[in-house]
């Protein structure tokens, strides 16, 4: 493992500023959709930031001959899995007590899709993201994590 030698971008306050704008636009869009009509662009900002940072790590490590697939993916797992597992388990537990059988079945499908990072593909075959039925999908937000993880899987190759 070359983990102690891998290249990671230095702290960039400008990127944190972009993250803040992205967060505020997404939260504003969901809280006040009639006022913040284009707030969903914040998700695009997150995708661009993620692509930039991941590319910086990959290309920096390739230049130094220290890129290692195992280290790259282990780092992604350590960063994402703890929070994801907590969300999926908490959703399952809440669904067990709060949902009707058909709703719980749909939640199970969405939990499996979230764990497999394919929520975007599963939801694509269901109703649209902005339709009225979206409030019945507590894991709807995992579509963007699916896209990001698919990028992490294919981009380094």
Image: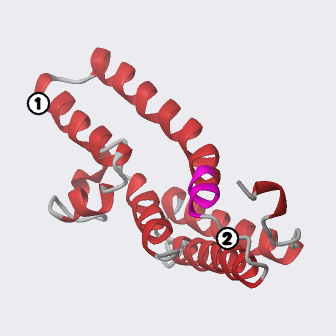
Residue 67 is tagged as 2
Q: Residue at x 49, y 59 (%)?
A: 30
Picture quadrant where residue 129 is located: bottom left
Residue toward you, 27 or 46: 46
In the displayed structure image, the side of residue 154 where residue 72 appears, left or right = right
Numbered disc 2: secondary structure: loop
Looking at the image, what colour scheme do you see? secondary structure
Q: Is residue 38 left or right of residue 22?
A: left
Residue 70 location, x and y as percent? 58, 56
- The answer to whether residue 131 is seen in the rendering is no
x then y, percent, for residue 146: 40, 59
Q: Determine whether 25 is above or below 41 in the image.
A: above
Cβ–Cβ below 8 Å for labels 2 and 1? no
Residue at image location 25% in from the left, 36% down from the top:
107
- Front label number (2 vs 1): 2
Residue beneath the point at 62% across and 60% down: 72
Judge the density around disc 1: few (<14), some (14-19), many (≥20) Cα neighbours within 10 Å.
few
Q: Which residues are drawn in magenta?
A: 69-74
Q: Quadrant of the N terminus?
A: bottom right
Q: Position of residue 29 (x, y in %)?
A: 52, 66
Comparing 62 with 30, the one in front is: 62
Query: Where does label 1 land, which residue?
Result: 102
């Amino acid at each position: 493992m070359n983990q102690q030698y891998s290249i990671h971008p230095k702290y960039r306050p400008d990127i944190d500023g972009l993250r803040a704008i992205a967060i505020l636009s997404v939260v504003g869009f969901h809280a006040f959709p009639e006022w913040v009509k284009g707030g969903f662009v914040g998700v695009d900002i997150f995708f661009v930031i993620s692509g930039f940072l991941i590319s910086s790590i990959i290309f920096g490590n390739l230049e130094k001959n220290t890129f290692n697939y195992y280290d790259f993916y282990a780092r992604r797992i350590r960063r994402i899995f703890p929070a994801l597992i907590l969300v999926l388990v908490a959703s399952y537990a809440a669904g067990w007590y709060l949902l009707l059988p058909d709703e719980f079945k749909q939640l199970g499908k969405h939990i499996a899709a979230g764990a497999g990072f394919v929520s975007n593909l599963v939801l694509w075959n269901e109703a649209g993201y902005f339709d009225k039925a979206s409030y019945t999908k507590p894991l709807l937000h995992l579509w963007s994590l699916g896209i990001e993880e698919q990028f992490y899987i294919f981009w380094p190759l």
